[in-house]
Amino acid sequence: MVNDGDAWLRQDEDQKMAIIRKAFQMFDITKSGFIDTLKIATILTSMGQPYDKNELERLIKENDPEDTGKVNIDGFSKIAGPFLEEDDAESTHQELKEAFRLYDREGNGYITTSTLKEILAALDDKLSSADLDGIIAEIDTDGSQTVDFDEFMEMMTGD
């Protein structure tokens, strides 16, 4: 018989992996199965996750021993996983709401897709305009040229 604590633990781990997978997919623009290790700090910051720079560097070296500058989803999970706070859903929601608020500079309740495009371009200068348009099309599911909090939340958590 499985006790309820084990079920909650598995659910938390599943949610954590869904968040990690979604973040990885957002930054694996070329769908190569790899992301640049230089972007991991940016990814953690965009997720509202605090991290220790020295610990992050140690984990990157551990998971990219040949110093290729790239990691796959397993490596990313081993690097980012320890920094993801063991929060409940409400706490995660609040952190994402705060991150959204930072991008919603005018306080309109949405981010324009052009603003989101600028943010993504700044995060990865190798993205072509077509790559950025593809990302925006996936995120702006209702075609409104804006990303509201629900779309942002879905983008960040995969829920």
Image: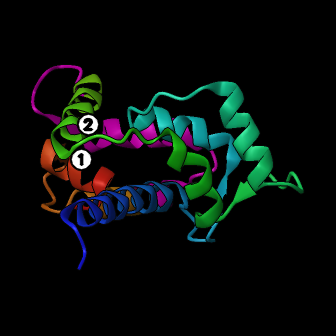
Secondary structure type for disc 1: helix
Name the residue furthest right.
66
- State yes or no: discs 1 and 2 in contact (Cβ < 8 Å): yes
Query: Residue 21, relative to residue 54: is it above or below?
Result: below
Q: Residue at x 55, y 57 (%)?
A: 77
Q: Amino acid at mark 1?
A: Phe
Residue 81 lies, in percent from the top left, at 51, 49
| Front in this rendered view, residue 139 or 50 | 50
The residue where tag 1 is placed is 152
Which mark is drawn over residue 96?
2
**Residue 45 located left or right of residue 41:** left
Image coloring type = rainbow
Q: Is residue 73 left or right of residue 71?
A: left
- Camera-side mark, 1 or 2: 2
Instruction: Identify the residue at image location x=19%, y=52%.
Output: 151
Residue 88 appears in view: yes
Image-based side of 65 in relation to 157, left or right: right
The image quadrant where one finds the N terminus is bottom left
Quarter of the image where one finds residue 6:
bottom left
Q: SS class of the residue under badge 2?
A: helix
Earlier-in-chain disc, 1 versus 2: 2
Which residues make up the magenta segment?
104-132
Residue 159 x %, y %: 21, 61
Residue 118 in view in this figure: no
Image height of 132 relative to 92, above or below: below
Alpha carbon of mark 1 to alpha carbon of mark 2: how far? Answer: 8 Å
| Mark 2: amino acid | Leu
- Residue drawn 28% across the image and 57% down it: 139
Quadrant of res 143: bottom left
Q: Position of residue 144 (x, y in %)?
A: 13, 52
